[in-house]
Amino acid sequence: MKIATWNVNSIKVRLDHAKNWVETNHPDVLMIQELKGEAFPSETFQAIGYNAEFVGQKAYNGVAVLSPHPINVILNRLPGDDADEQARYLEVEVKGLRLINIYLPNGNPVDSEKFPYKLQWMARLKDRLAHLRREGIVFAVGGDFNVIPEPEDCHDPKAWENDALFRPESRAAFRALLWLGLTDALRVVNNAPRQYTYWDYQAGAWPADKGIRIDHFLLSPTLTDRLQDCVIDRDPRALDKASDHTPLVMTID
DNA sequence: ATGGCGAGACTATCTCGA
């Protein structure tokens, strides 16, 4: 079973890229983040044999799940704050497997209300995942975590040291997810440096390979045992009008 | 050494992202 995650930075602008990637790679599931609109072009994916579920909002955020298999929606918002209207969470079941697609808040600037919102969101995520662990549910959570877990996940840790993506509080909250018994899938199979999933549009970051690793899959224990492979597909980042993120792809037996 | 982007929205400069 091939499962992928990709922050497309506007599904409207990246529709051809996403459709072509699905047709080329035939994932069993694609988790998409940053739709940036209320609507989702389900017909385009229906035409190539994929079902779609999504949560959208005007201009910002938005997450979708695509699959050629039936998609059973379990939750379309992260529990723990009824006042939170941001479209960042979609929990589904596909082929009996629980899959959670997240677009975790960026959190910058750190002296604004956005940083505590990020940390509260991460605490709510931890509560939800702890609940799933207690229930014995086998799951993967994937998406744009907006967290650089370790210095080696970043081309220049010094340049990022006061950024919400790399602040000690953000990294500690990420480790708290791991302490639920979850595993960072990419690092099971690949400990090499420079395994980035995002490169800024500015300053020639892509040609210079000045990236960061912020898109992740975290797996519950029995799913980790079933992990066959996990790779970053850099090809879409090189396209014209590319997203600033590129897909992360894992294979489960 | 420095500056360097892109998308969406109350179409013209804003906010937001990372």
Image (spheres, grey):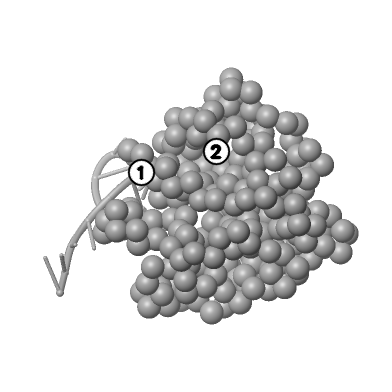
Name which residue type carries label 2.
Glu
Q: In this view, does A4 lie to the left or right of A80?
A: left
- Assess disc 2: are there few (<14), some (14-19) or many (≥20) residues with their C-alpha within 10 Å of its C-alpha: some
Q: Where is residue A165 in the image (x, y as percent from the top left)?
A: 49, 68
Residue shown at 70%/52% (left/top)?
Answer: A227
The answer to which image quadrant residue A199 occupies is bottom left
Q: Image height check: is A53 above or below B2?
A: above
Q: Nearer the viewer, residue A175 or A223?
A: A223
Name which residue type carries label 1.
Ala
Q: Residue A238 carries which label?
A: 1
Extreme-right residue of the structure = A135
Q: Which chain hosts label 1?
A: A
Q: Which mark is residue A115?
A: none
Residue shown at 66%/36% (left/top)?
Answer: A28
| Residue under numbered circle 2 | A38
The answer to which image quadrant residue A170 occupies is bottom right
Q: Image height check: is A197 above or below A187?
A: above
Residue shown at 57%/43% (left/top)?
Answer: A32
Q: Is residue A219 left or right of residue A166?
A: right
Q: Where is residue A204 in the image (x, y as percent from the top left)?
A: 27, 56
Marks 1 and 2, how far apart at CA: 28 Å
Q: Which chain hosts label 2?
A: A
Residue shown at 41%/75% (left/top)?
Answer: A157
Q: Position of residue A94 (x, y in %)?
A: 76, 39
